[in-house]
Amino acid sequence: MIGRGTNFRNGLINTKPRPRILVAGISPDDSFVTGLRRLAPTVHVLRQDIAEVRADEWDALICVGPPQYVPAHLYMLTVPPPGHIEDLRADSTNERRIRIASEVGHICTYIRDPAGLGLDEELHRLVLEKLIPIVGQRATHQHFVARQLNAYSQPFGERLTQPILSPFLETDSGVALAASYTRALGGGQAWVLPEDVGDLLPWVAAALRAWKRQDHLRFPTAPGWETEPAWRTPEEQAVLVRLSELKQRWANALRGLEQEEETLANQLEAATDRANREDRAILTTRAGSLVEVVARFLRELGFEVESVDEQRPDGDLLEDLRVRAKEDPNWIALVEVRAYGGGARARDFQRIGRFALRFALEHGAAPAARWYIVSQFVGQDPATRPSPFSTNQEDLSTFAADDGLVVDTSVLFQLAMSVRRGQLGAQAARTLLTRQRGAFELPVLSTGAQE
């Protein structure tokens, strides 16, 4: 059952109210951001670039500074420095493109009356009150142009004569000092303003109202005088205060969760590195250090493990390990450890047989078990490695008849992990190893520990 507080739109849960505005190049603590949150219900300040978010979930971008890649569906209000703003594809090929650029130069300061540009009343007022006084103080002018790029154009492109930009203000020679344009076929509209335009909030408010007239689905609400504090009722103000407090708690919780996520990600990275170096080495190691890894796994299961070669003179090599079980002091297994890029090798059975014969001559009794622990098909996914000697049952049966047990290191790894997870007790694991013969198999385990 979905609770009353669930935000459910268009079959999706937890969608944010529109318009959803991204902000780039402005600090989250800037007063502009606070003001923008009064104009739009969903605002997110980008820390670096737009790759931080799923762009198709957002409606518009407010960008101060060098433009970044912006998906064409986003509406955009940008205050760029001189330079490249973006390229628009002019036709179905990649050969003809239109570049929108910000340039600076000494141009004619005569300005056409914006009344003839078809601006709405609010935008016309902004141009008269906010932009013209700034423009009149300049010696050189930042302006905006559309240039055609193709194989035959100059490096910076040829200036277009067809109307790509819709000026908000222009010189008598037709140079746009602020303008809008359509970013792509079916895409959003862009507003480009000069760097010294000043307070952006009134321009954003005007843009949101203009964009609502173009796309009421993305911009279902637009700021009006009704939202100004002077005209709010006490009831509205009280709810707004509670909403602001909720958003702050949400932001604090999100920061806490992000920090917790980073901590856990670092812990996972460290655990993975440790597992690769220590535990999964039993599946990947080819060299003699595999003996040390196997010995550590067997000790973890509670066996007493003795490295035999370390006690012999140089050149007098025997089995790699001798293993004893604490349940029976007379029980002992000779262990040979091998690793191969291919399958386990039957000739290792003869090698272990010679070790067992020498043990019997020295101690007057045969070992209780012969273990052949093998890491086979090293380099392959352990899940795809076949059981040792699955195609050579005759040699496997002969080895089993001599108290032999073949243990694939992938199965030994799973056995140890089952003990760590509590699915199997260490004593039960030792019993499985000491009683089985042939190819060792791990039984199906329940979630409860077994002793």
Image: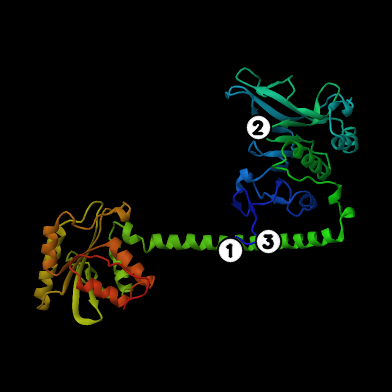
Circle 3: residue type? Trp
Q: Nearer the viewer, mark 1 or mark 3?
A: 3
Q: Secondary structure at mark 1?
A: helix
Query: Quadrant of the image for the N terminus?
Result: bottom right
Q: Nearer the viewer, mark 2 or mark 3?
A: 2
Q: Residues within 10 Å of mark 1 (few under 14, many from 20)?
A: few
* Residue 307 in view here: no
Query: Quadrant of the image for the C terminus?
Result: bottom left
251 horizontally vs 179: left or right: left
How far apart are labels 2 and 1 at the CA level? 41 Å
Quadrant of the rendered image containing residue 204: top right
Q: Is residue 175 above or below residue 239?
A: above
Q: Secondary structure at mark 3?
A: helix
Q: Residues within 10 Å of mark 3 (few under 14, many from 20)?
A: few
Q: What residue sits 14% from the left and 61% below the top? A: 396
The residue labelled by disc 1 is: 260
Instruction: Choose between 306 and 98: the one closer to the eye.
Output: 98
Circle 2: residue type? Gly
Q: What residue sits 85% from the left and 25% below the top? A: 171
Q: What residue sits 38% from the left and 63% below the top? A: 278
Circle 1: residue type? Glu
Instruction: Choose between 179 and 364: the one closer to the eye.
Output: 179
Label 2 with label 3: CB-CB less than 8 Å: no
Mark earlier in primary sequence (2, 1):
2
Q: How is the image coloured?
A: rainbow
The residue labelled by disc 2 is: 186
The residue labelled by disc 3 is: 250
x and y percent of residue 57 in the render? Answer: 63, 46
How far apart are labels 1 and 3 at the CA level? 15 Å
* Residue 162 in view here: yes
